[in-house]
Image (cartoon, rainbow, N blue to C red):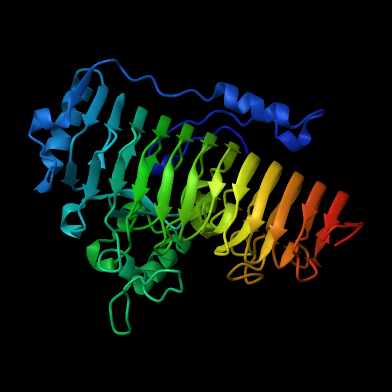
Amino acid sequence: MRFDRREVIASGAVALAAVPVRASALGGDPWDQARKIVWRIRPPRIPGRSAKVTDYGAKGDGTTLNGRAFATAIADLSARGGGRLIVAGGRFLTGPIELQSNVELHVAAGATIAFSTDPADFPTVLTRFEGVEMMGLAPLIYAHGKRNIAITGAGTLDGQASDRHWWSWKGPWKGTVDNGWRDGMPDQRAARRRLFEMAEARTPVEKRVFGAQDLLRPAFIEPYLCENVLIEGVKLRGAPFWQVHPVLSRNVIVRNLDILGHGPNNDGCDPESCTDVLIDNVTFDTGDDCIAIKSGRNEDGRRVAMPSRNFVIRHCRMREGHGGITIGSEISGGVSNVFAERCTMDSPNLDYAIRFKNNAMRGGVLEGFHYRDIAVGEVKQAVIACDFNYEEGAKGGFVPVLRDVTVDRLTARRSVMALDSQGLPGAPIERVRLRDCDFDGVTTPSKIAFTNGLSLDRVHVNGAPVAKL
C-alpha cells in the first residue's frame, strides 16, 4: 500500500490530492494539522438561481411518485449551470434521486422526501456494499463523479425502511428493534457471500451485478467519486442500510444532521476512502456504528488501494450504536490523520465510545489518531477498544497495523472496562497514549494483549491513579 498521489482507475478516473505529512510525524502540536484540514475544507459553490420541484409537476401529497419531476428539475438546473432545487410544503414520494454537479437539494423545514420501498424503482449503479465495489441498487440519494453538490435544509429524508421494508433482507439480526426476518424468509446471506468471493477473485466490477432478487440493501446518501460535498441540516429517518456514505470523495462536510435509525447496519456516517472530511455537530442514534471510517474490504480494498485520511470530527453527540467513533472494519486501504474533539457519547445501548476493529483478512495501516475532550456517560462494554480479533481475527495473511493513538481529557461515568486493547502475535498495537483521563464506574479490569508502548499520564480508574491497566 502506498500513501501517495494516484488515480482510482477501477472506479472511473479521479485524481485525489497528495497526502500531507501525517500528523504523527510532525513536531509540535499535532492539532495544528487538524486546523489546517478544517481551513482547506470549503463548502461547494452553488449558483444563486433556484427552482421549486413543484414547478416541475411534483405533488407533496405523500402518494404521487415524483421521480420524474425530481429528475427533470435537476437536469434543468444542471443545464443552466446549476442552482438550488427547493422541496417545500408537503411529503414528496420518489424513487432514488441522482444529483448533478453544481446542484443543491434543499429540503425546507416541514417538508419530507419519502423514498419508495419498491425495488423496481431502483436502477443499477456503481456502488459499494460493505466495502466491496459492485453494480447494485442505487442509493436513495446518489451522485457519481460530480463536483459541488449539496443536500441542505431543516426538513426530513425518510427512507421508509422498517420491519416490513428493506430491513428483513438482512436476515438474522440481534438488534434493539425487530427487523421483521423470520426463519424461512429470503435474505442477503447467499448474495453477500457471492459478492465477497467475486471480490477475492478480482472479478471485474462490471460483472458483479446484483439486483433486487439478491437482497443487498441500498445506502441512503452516497456521493461516489465526488469533490466538494455538503450534507447539512436535514433529518435522516428510516434508512435501509448505511446512512451517510461518501466513497472515494474529497472535501466533504457533514454538518448539523439529526440521524436516527435503529435498523440493521444503520451506521450513521461511513466515509470510505475519502480525503479531507469534516463531521461537525451531528446527532447520532443508530443501529450500528455512529461514525465508522472505512477504506475497502479485504482484496477489494487492496485493489482500489485508496486510504481514508485527514478527518476532523467535533461537537457530535452519540447515543445508541455499536461504536461512537469507529475505525474499520472494512479498512484494508488504511487510514491516517483522524482528529476528534468535544464529542459526547452516552447510552446503555452504545457498546464502545472509541473503537478500532481490524484483522488479518483486512490488513491495512491505521495511524495518527488524536482525541481530546471526549465526555462519555455510559457504554455497554469498554470505553476504548482496539481489536484485531474482529470477525476472522488471525485467519489471514495480511498484517493489521494500528499505531499512534492519543486520547486526552476523556471522562467516562460507567463502563465494563476502561481499555480493551488486543493485537495479534506478530502484529502488536503500537503506542497508545492516555493523558488526563478519568474512568469511573468501571467493573472489570482492562484487557491488554499484544500491545506495545501503552502510556498512561494522570489516568484515574474509579477515582484512583493508575500506572498501568
Q: Nearer the viewer, residue 412 or 426?
A: 412
Q: Say which of 185 and 210 sits in front.
A: 185
Q: Is 243 left or right of 110, judged from the image as shown?
A: right
Q: Quadrant of residue 143?
A: top left
Is residue 171 at all visible to an observer of this figure? yes
Q: Nearer the viewer, residue 258 or 69?
A: 258
201 lies above or below 189? above
Badge count = 0
Q: Quadrant of residue 381?
A: bottom right
Residue farthest along the top direction in this orientation: 48
Q: Position of residue 21 (x, y in %)?
A: 70, 30
Q: Is residue 36 above or below residue 445?
A: above
- Residue depicted at 25% across the width and 68% down the height: 164
Residue 36 position in % (x across, y down): 64, 24
Q: Is residue 347 above or below residue 444?
A: above
Residue 35 in the image: state x and y as whole percent.
65, 26
Horizontal relation, residue 64 to residue 15: left or right: left
Q: Nearer the viewer, residue 202 or 314?
A: 314
Residue 468 sits in quarter: bottom right
Residue drawn 67% across the image and 47% down it: 375
Q: Quadrant of the C terminus?
A: bottom right
